[in-house]
């Protein structure tokens, strides 16, 4: 892992663990804080070793053999050789919504997943550009950061819901933290702030890494304009047929799986497609551009 991504991983784990502690303390005072701390440690360890499995399961992906998807396997194998990476496991998600993602803590334990919709929508070169983008995530070690964020953000959402449940059933009547009671202001803040803060952290890491993966994918495939075309078609396709996935895993996909537009775009974990396409066009025409 690069130093830059290593620092980001530490920052994310620290920030997300802090959110877990905030919600735990709001629910159960000092006792809840201790329980949340222990839970945070277990969650971080579990996320490191198993978050790829969780992300694949949450998205409904199933592994396919080279006999079941020969063209996709050949494409991924060729691009992995270009990127000097081990060939990742190949998964398919049975949904008409066009999208794809990569996961895994390192290149030796990586997987790429594509929906049936993306394989039907895109041309060979466009799909090749998308798979190259996902391999760039693996090469940059972004998948470790992404999968840890997906797992812990999902845990934060769950704990925030628990806090809301506690508030509805009389938890707000106690405010003595020393006796394990709930601070009503802290509880309300954790219910509102924790999910938003988790989303903002996802946004901060995901947007910069998408730009870098676009650049890396264009280099791996050698066809930046094919990837640019794919992104435009995927955005239109996802708008018509949004994907039903857990919001905690939305940042893993190459394009926002939900229908965008309006205020939702402000909280998207993905940078604007128009900006991503513009950067790829600059790359195709030989002009340098930033990757973050």
Image (tube, rainbow, N blue to C red):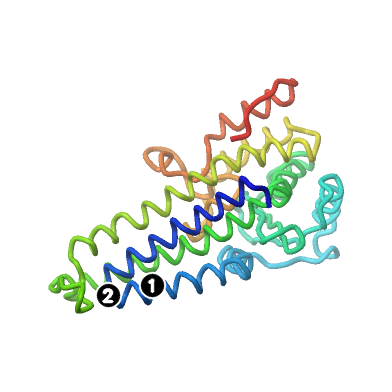
Q: Would you place residue 198 above or below residue 268 in this image?
A: below
Q: Residue at x 51, y 74 (%)?
A: 42
Residue 152, above or below 81: below
In the rendered structure, find residue 28 and report the number of the disc placed on it.
2
Q: Residue 115 lies in what quarter of the image?
A: bottom right
Q: Is the residue marked by circle 2 packed among few (<14), some (14-19), or many (20+) residues within 10 Å?
A: many
- Looking at marks 2 and 1 on the same chain, the residue that comes earlier in the sequence is marked by 2
Residue 85 location in percent, x, y? 81, 53
35 left or right of 276 in image: left
Direction from residue 68 to residue 292 in the image, left or right: left
Image coords of residue 116 (percent x, y): 68, 55
Secondary structure beneath disc 1?
helix
Q: Nearer the viewer, residue 192 or 89?
A: 192
Q: Which residue is mark 1?
A: 36
Kindly check if marks 2 and 1 are in contact, taking CB atoms under 8 A apart as contact.
Answer: yes
Query: Disc 2 on helix, strand or loop?
Result: helix
Q: Nearer the viewer, residue 83 or 99?
A: 83
Residue 94: % across, % down: 64, 61
Query: 55 or 262: which is nearer to us?
Result: 55
């Amino acid at each position: 892992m690069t130093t830059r991504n290593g620092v980001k991983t530490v920052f994310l784990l620290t920030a997300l663990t802090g959110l877990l502690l905030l919600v735990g303390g709001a629910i159960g005072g000092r006792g809840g804080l201790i329980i949340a701390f222990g839970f945070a440690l277990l969650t971080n360890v579990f996320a490191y070793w198993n978050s790829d499995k969780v992300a694949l399961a949450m998205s409904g992906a199933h592994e396919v053999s080279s006999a079941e998807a020969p063209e996709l396997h050949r494409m991924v194998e060729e691009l992995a050789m270009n990127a000097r990476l081990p060939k990742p496991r190949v998964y398919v998600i049975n949904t008409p919504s066009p999208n794809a993602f990569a996961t895994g803590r390192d290149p030796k334990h990586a997987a790429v997943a594509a929906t049936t919709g993306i394989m039907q929508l895109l041309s060979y070169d466009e799909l090749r550009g998308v798979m190259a983008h996902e391999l760039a995530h693996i090469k940059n070690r972004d998948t470790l950061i992404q999968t840890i964020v997906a797992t812990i953000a999902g845990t934060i959402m769950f704990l925030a819901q628990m806090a809301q449940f506690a508030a509805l059933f009389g938890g707000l009547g106690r405010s003595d933290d020393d006796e394990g009671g709930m601070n009503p202001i802290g509880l309300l803040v954790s219910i509102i702030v924790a999910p938003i803060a988790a989303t903002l952290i996802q946004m901060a890491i995901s947007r910069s890494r998408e730009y870098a993966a676009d650049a890396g994918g264009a280099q791996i495939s050698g066809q930046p304009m094919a990837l640019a075309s794919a992104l435009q078609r995927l955005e239109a396709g996802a708008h018509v047929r949004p994907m039903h996935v857990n919001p905690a895993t939305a940042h893993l996909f190459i394009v926002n799986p939900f229908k965008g537009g309006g205020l939702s775009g402000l909280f998207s974990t993905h940078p604007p497609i128009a900006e991503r396409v513009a950067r790829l066009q600059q790359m195709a025409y030989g002009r340098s551009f930033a990757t973050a």
